[in-house]
Image (cartoon, coloured by chain):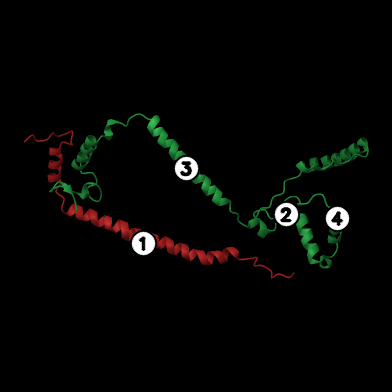
Amino acid sequence: MLASRALSLIGKRAISASVCVRGAHGVAKVEDYTLPPYFDRRETPLPEVAYVQQLTPEQKSLKEKEKGSWAALSNEEKLALYRISFKDSFAEMNQGSEEWKSVVGGILFFLGFTGLVILWQRKYVYGPVPHTFETLYKEQELQRMLDMRINPVEGFSAKWDYENKQWKK
Amino acid sequence: MSLQKPIMRGLLAKRLRFHLPIAFGIAITVALSYKFGVTEPRKKAYANFYKQYDAVKEFNAMREAGVFESVRPSGK
């Protein structure tokens, strides 16, 4: 507390001293890129800067009139003041667009292209499948699963008729 | 322009009044249908299977098929 109080004393004196030293330069000019950007977003209804930074003379006089009683403003003036501060109204910023059609089209197109790439890979890149995929081997696998009584209650072997050696109807 | 003042309070409560019964209803319906569609038939299927289950007969059948490593087929 004491330290901040002491610092504020020194700080005030330092600032006034620097202004005196630099003559009449004072504050630097505010560049556009140094200001926060303006966003029309539903989540942040009050952007950090007004939309229009450089006011025309009519807008400047309107801003002066705004400092008085607001009941004296006409509806057009109120709208003009709104458009100085904001770019889109909530209705305008929330309206949908047709962009989703392009997005879905692009997705499907690239899915199709990927399918072609995979087909080419299967033919020209991959070697043969293992011998365990041959029909005879698969039949032996199936017979062994039935012999082991895989899932005999509700699943695999439950559907096999062991008496008549065929699938249950 | 003099618009009507919009509703400023109780928005969440209003939404919950509408959606909460629906949410509970759907959740309970799904739970009940799963219970009576899946778990009860499954319990009955297991009960019926083990009513007529002869473990020794099944063992001998599996042994003859040659799936065990501890006992060989009886060779008859």
Using the image, determine if residue B13 lies above or below residue A116. below
Q: Quadrant of residue A11?
A: top right
User: How much space separates mark 4 and mark 3, taking CA atoms?
Assistant: 55 Å
Q: Residues within 10 Å of mark 1 (few under 14, many from 20)?
A: few
Which mark's residue is nearer the viewer, 1 or 4? 4
Residue type, label 4? Lys
**Residue at 79% in and 59% down:** A81
Residue designated by label 1: B32
Residue type, label 2? Lys
User: How much space separates mark 3 and mark 1, taking CA atoms?
Assistant: 39 Å
Q: Are marks 1 and 4 in contact (CB under 8 Å)?
A: no
User: How much space separates mark 1 and mark 4, taking CA atoms?
Assistant: 68 Å
Label 2 vs 4, first from the N-terminus: 4
Which chain's colour is red?
Answer: B
Residue designated by label 3: A111
Image coordinates of residue A7 in percent, x first then y, are 82, 40
Image coordinates of residue A161 in percent, x first then y, are 16, 49
